[in-house]
Image: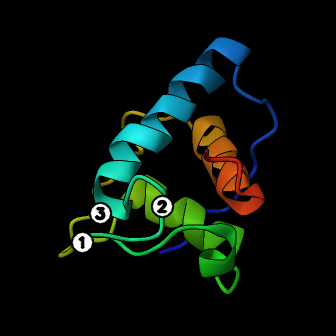
Amino acid sequence: MFIALSVSAEPSVERQGYLDKLLKQDCGSCHGLTLKGGLGSAIRPQDISERSDEALFSTIKLGLPGLAMPPWGELLSDSDIQWLVDRLRKGETE
């Protein structure tokens, strides 16, 4: 199931700081602290280049049933999720 992206507002600077920590700590706990992979797959720009923004958005929002990837949609807004997708695409995670 894919989610249509219609996100316009960017999270506040304060929220971006929270999301940056979440990406490094929570995502990094499975995807590796440098996002080169671990329990979860690698999620650096070169590793996700074949995946669409919609697929990445959907994976973050809904998780991957049957795998360790939890759904984050109840904790993160669509704007938060889109910001994370953009951050991963740009490789701005260190």
Which marked residue is nearer to the observer: mark 1 or mark 2? 2
Q: Please state which amino acid type lies under the numbered disc 2.
A: Leu
Work out whether mark 2 precedes mark 3 in sequence or the reverse, and give the earlier one: 2
Work out whether mark 1 precedes mark 2 in sequence or the reverse, and give the earlier one: 2
**Residue at image mark 3:** 69
Q: In screen coordinates, is 83 left or right of 77?
A: right
Dot 1: element: loop
Q: Quadrant of residue 15?
A: top right
**Residue at image mark 2:** 35
- Residue shown at 60%/79% (left/top)? 47
| Contact between labelled residues 3 and 2, with CB atoms less than 8 Å apart | no
- Residue shown at 70%/80% (left/top)? 49
Disc 3 from disc 1: Cα separation: 7 Å
- Residue shown at 65%/57% (left/top)? 88
Q: Dot 1 surroundings within 10 Å: few (below 14), some, or many (20 or more)?
A: few
**Residue at image mark 1:** 65
Q: What percent of the width, then of the height, locates residue 31?
A: 37, 62
Dot 2: element: loop
Name the residue furthest left: 66
Q: Quadrant of residue 10?
A: top right
Tell which of 29 and 85 is nearer to you: 29
Q: What percent of the width, then of the height, locates residue 23?
A: 48, 43
Disc 1 from disc 2: Cα separation: 21 Å
Q: Please state which amino acid type lies under the numbered disc 3.
A: Met
